[in-house]
Amino acid sequence: MPSAPNHRAVAVILLVPLMVALALWAFSWPAARIAPRDLPVGVAGSAAAADQLHEQLERHEGAFEIHRYDDASAARAAIEDRVVYGAVVAGDKGPQLLTASAASPVVSQLLTEAVAGAAPAGTAVPVTDVVAAPAADPRGSALGASILPLALAGVASGAVVTLMKLRGARAAVTLAVTAALVGIVATAVAHSWLGVITGGWWAEAGVMGLTVLAIGSAVAGLAVLIGTPGIGLGALLMVLLGNPFSGATSAPELLPEPVGVIGQWLPPGAGGSLLRSVAFFDGSAAGGAASVLAAWAALGLVAVLIGGRRRPERTDGADPSVHRPDPVPVG
């Protein structure tokens, strides 16, 4: 009937602009609303001077979550442990700023501007980069850009496993081996060739592989649970939301609430945070992100394995539950 093609045409006409609007919202809105929101920073030094610095930071209402430390050494240790992004140290010659551009170049620049703006006119604030970003990627652009290819690789692996009708243990092994190989290849490019990550080689490969496995198994698991539309839902969740909500190019605390929190509960955000910890901070503060990735991977693989026990659908339209007698041999 001619009405069916017309309905499909109308659906396409309405669906494409809707998807474009959703993509623009997901990618552009967080980027347009970047600002510090309970950003963890430290204040260290003698009580009187530190109190003054504390008050100056508190004037930015809701912007900073302030941690107090006795001296510069304690503040430096907190930065290296990824407890805070930076710290202002009160000294005899005025304030000094400690930053970690490896944690987020955007945050380092923001703190530098905030502290310099609060200092008396004509006063230069010394800045020490405690954990510097690699020279090959001083702005963190390459590391931030690496999250989208990992998300696409995960979605692709889950989709291919589903469309090839791999089931059960075979599907799970395929997802795991594919993720491991992607992790090795990605680390060879990012670490060995480009030099934009500088941690332990195999640890970085493990993080990238786990990120791909978490995404791929989630997509394949959704496809087992709800059918082929699960691929689209997984892609929407991991790419259209997970990538822009990850905070990999800035910091989760700079994104609008609750986007930053949501992003860290999705594999792209957790993978970006874990990769940064492993690549630059010797694995500090890696537990939470690793747990998120492991949970997604485990749940997805369980769904894939359970789905493999179901009776496969017949492609000839016959009911597999109906027993048909064996054919009688002729002659």
Image (tube, grey):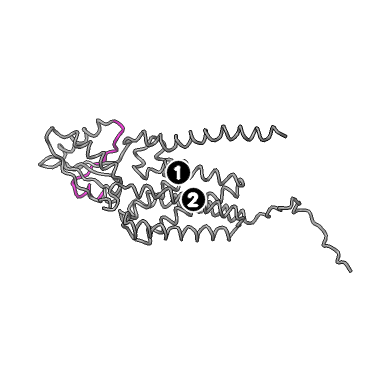
| The N terminus: image quadrant | top right
Query: What residue is at 43 percent from the left and 40 percent from the top?
Result: 262
Classify residue 197 by image quadrant. bottom left
Q: Secondary structure at mark 2?
A: helix
Residue reaching furthest left?
A: 93
Measure how far apart labels 1 and 2 are at the Cα level.
Answer: 10 Å
Q: Contact (CB < 8 A) between labels 1 and 2?
A: yes
Query: Is 67 colored magenta in this rendering?
Result: yes
Residue 244 percent across, percent down from the top left = 42, 41
Q: Read off the residue under disc 2.
A: 215
Residue 331 percent across, percent down from the top left = 89, 69
Depth check: 260 or 148 in front? 148
Query: What residue is at 16 percent from the left and 43 percent from the top?
Result: 126
The type of residue carrying mark 1 is Gly
Query: What residue is at 42 percent from the left and 55 percent from the top?
Result: 208
Q: Up-down: is 107 above or below 218?
A: above
Q: Which residues are magenta?
A: 61-78
The type of residue carrying mark 2 is Ile
